[in-house]
């Protein structure tokens, strides 16, 4: 069942973290933040919404990284209940899609809770001062082909934020599979 995130107050600070990545390193927010902004996106390996957008997500991340905007993805799903989202499978997903950004494992789900993440994909765009400015979607694509002339909403928003410091007025929420929370 598809889920959309509730609105968050823009201007909230980016929660810090220190998480292991599929490349064998551990990354903090400081490590992934860019001088002009940062995107943190919650994804997983098995969600059809993520699978449908992953190539566009990689392309858009490369565009933003070239603009001085940091980028990282985090998987917070319960890997016991959803073994497709295990750390080992995350490594394979990273390799299969040649991710140009760190793919981080939030095993205890504390980072997803700190950010208020609810679905995959779920995007959080921060300015250079790490204040939340974007809580929208990648683009208007869902699980089917991207409509002709679709805008690159995340890229447009983050470049505008980097250049002006202003959040876009119209932000359409992301849609995807719910984060698979651990019982208890």
Image (spheres, rainbow, N blue to C red):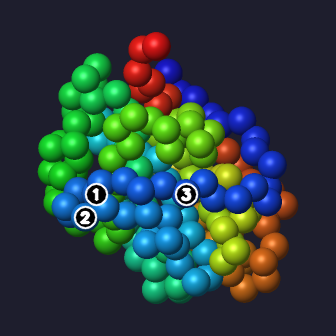
Expressed as whole percent of the image width and height from the top left, the position of residue 95 reads 17, 60
The residue labelled by disc 1 is 21
Q: Mark 1 or mark 3, which is nearer the start of the sequence?
A: 3
Figure quadrant of residue 75:
top left
Q: Secondary structure at mark 1?
A: loop
| Nearer mark to the viewer, of 3 and 1 | 3
Q: Is residue 174 visible?
A: no
Residue at figure coordinates x 41%, y 50% from the top left: 74
Expressed as whole percent of the image width and height from the top left, the position of residue 64 reads 51, 77
The residue labelled by disc 2 is 25
Residue at figure coordinates x 75%, y 45% from the top left: 8
Residue at figure coordinates x 34%, y 28% from the top left: 78
Figure quadrant of residue 99:
bottom left
Measure the alpha-carbon separation of dots 2 and 1: 5 Å
Asked if the residue under mark 1 is in contact with the one under mark 2, i.e. CB atoms within 8 Å, the reply is yes
Measure the alpha-carbon separation of dots 3 and 2: 17 Å
The residue labelled by disc 3 is 16
- Is the residue 31 above or below the residue 114 in the image? below
Expressed as whole percent of the image width and height from the top left, the position of residue 116 reads 62, 39
Measure the alpha-carbon separation of dots 3 and 1: 15 Å
Expressed as whole percent of the image width and height from the top left, the position of residue 21 reads 28, 57
Q: Mark 2 or mark 3, which is nearer the start of the sequence?
A: 3
Q: Is residue 120 left or right of residue 173?
A: left
Q: Secondary structure at mark 2?
A: loop
- Is the residue 68 above or below the residue 126 in the image? below
Q: Secondary structure at mark 3?
A: loop
Label 1: how many Cα within 10 Å (few below 14, some 14–19, many 20+): many
């Amino acid at each position: 069942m598809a889920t959309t995130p509730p609105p968050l107050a823009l201007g909230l600070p980016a929660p810090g973290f220190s998480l292991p990545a599929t490349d064998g390193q551990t990354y903090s927010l400081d490590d992934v933040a860019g001088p002009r902004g940062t995107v943190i996106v919650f994804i997983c390996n098995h969600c059809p919404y993520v699978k449908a957008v992953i190539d566009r997500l990689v392309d858009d991340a490369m565009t933003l990284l070239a603009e001085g905007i940091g980028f990282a993805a985090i998987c917070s799903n319960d890997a016991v209940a959803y073994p497709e989202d295990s750390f080992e499978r995350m490594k394979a997903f990273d390799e299969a899609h040649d991710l140009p950004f760190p793919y981080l494992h939030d095993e205890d789900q504390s980072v997803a809770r700190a950010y208020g993440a609810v679905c995959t994909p779920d995007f959080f765009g921060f300015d250079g001062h790490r204040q939340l400015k974007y809580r929208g979607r990648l683009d208007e694509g869902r699980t089917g082909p991207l409509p002709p002339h679709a805008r690159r909403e995340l890229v447009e928003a983050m470049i505008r934020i980097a250049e002006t410091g202003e959040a876009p007025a119209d932000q359409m929420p992301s849609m995807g599979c719910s984060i698979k929370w651990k019982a208890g």
